[in-house]
Image (tube, grey):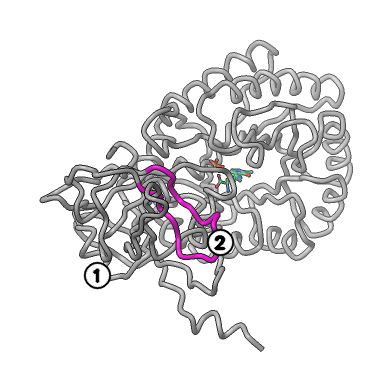
Amino acid sequence: MLEVFPETAAVEDGELTIGGLGARRLAAEFGTPLLVYDERTMLEAARAYRAAAPNAFIAYGVKAFPNVSVLRLLAGEGLGADVATLGELTIALRAEIPGERLIVHGNNKSVEELDAAARAGAWLVVIDAPDEIELAAAAGVERVLVRTTPGVEADTHPAIRTAHHGSKFGLPPVQTLEAIGRARDVGLEVAGLHVHIGSQLLDDSAAIETVEWLAGFAERCRRELDWAPGVVDLGGGLGIQYVPGRVPPSIAEFVETIVGNLGSQWDSVDLPRPQLVLEPGRSIVGRAGVTLYEVGAVKEVMGSTKYVAVDGGMSDNPRPQLYQAQYTGLLANRATEPPNGNYVVCGKHCESGDVMIRDLPLPEPRRGDLLAVPSTGAYTLTMASNYNLVPRPAAVLVGDGEARLIRRRETIEDLLDLEH
Ligand code: LLP
């Protein structure tokens, strides 16, 4: 079970510890629900990307968990940032990521966003729609990638699949060729191509298919446009393990396969090897994060279903509702007690769909226990809502036996401040 927890997770005297700190102490000091991020897990993930592809540019996919401290930590490992909105661009700048390490995305960038990207001196702006070419040039953007959709159907949830034909992202092949030509005509430097296949990929088959397709497409670009991509950005996508069972490839395996394939495919079409860019989000921060909840009401209904309710739910983690995502968990203060049955972990929100885990074996939970839900570092807090006017949780970074608040807990006052 601890394999889905962060690197430093351990059980000491029956209590879950992360970064050398006991769950009870963390909950007492910072309150619950609390997102606990393990520094070492994030650093190791960042280093694994750098080691597997030393010549690639690795841009952290900020959307997975936009946070100044995390961005600074990753920047210290040589990572840049992939941002998709003005908000994400602004937080990357707040973390002092230099413009030349920024990649700006978005399938519907506003003029304000393009202006901000140009002002920041972003290394690359990724063209996602035909009329964005003129808007980008007018904003003073210098260098672009064109995002293309090869028609690859990644084996993942349909909502997070992005490179299929009919996707709202990027341009189909023929429109991509037109966009490259037009962008060059208006004076933009077209540095290369971008494909993001999809997210939570549990094998490398879609990535291999995409690289093969891209090599053929690069060859076609050279023939038809006398232009070839100097940069190939394959986006993010490597998945993480949420529950015991199917294990995704390691970062090293996944990235080394991509690097090897890119080299051989490009050699086979006789083009100079491009610079590889990767934009991992989930595989950097996902496993590093554990959510601590406090157990409240426990009840058995109809003599069979045992509910254990926690002090958060679909507001701090909507992934079970959005993607039927599965999670596991343990009682952090009674981690070695044997289970006495299977429980349905539900949240405190006013709908029956607010269920986080369906069948979780636990020792009989009691009010005040702590439930730790691992693999919650990516796409949880960033997608959190204030449903039922529940303030969003705090986040702490743990390492070397210390915890540092990296995002304060929202208050009801914060929410009421928006009223007019
Ligand atoms: N680059 C681009 C252009 C992207 O659209 C994404 C994610 C990434 C990089 C990072 O992908 P990752 O390495 O994290 O898979 N909310 C969903 C995930 C949405 C992913 C959106 N794009 C979830 O909770 O599963």
Q: How many numbered callouts?
A: 2
Q: Which residues are magenta?
A: 343-359
Q: Nearer the viewer, residue 14 or 257?
A: 14
Q: Nearer the viewer, residue 339 or 84?
A: 339
The residue indicated by pointer 1 is 28
Q: Nearer the viewer, mark 1 or mark 2?
A: 2
Residue 376: x percent and y percent? 42, 50
328 horizontally vs 229: left or right: left
239 horizontally vs 231: left or right: left
Name the kind of residue labelled 2 in the image: Glu
Q: Nearer the viewer, residue 286 or 337?
A: 337
Secondary structure found at label 2:
loop
Name the residue: 30% across, 36% down: 3
**Quadrant of the rendered image containing residue 246:** top left
Query: Which corner quadrant holds the C terminus?
Result: bottom right
Badge 2, how many Cα within 10 Å: few under 14, some, many 20+? few
Task: Tell me the tag on residue 351.
Answer: 2
Q: Quadrant of ligand 1?
A: top right
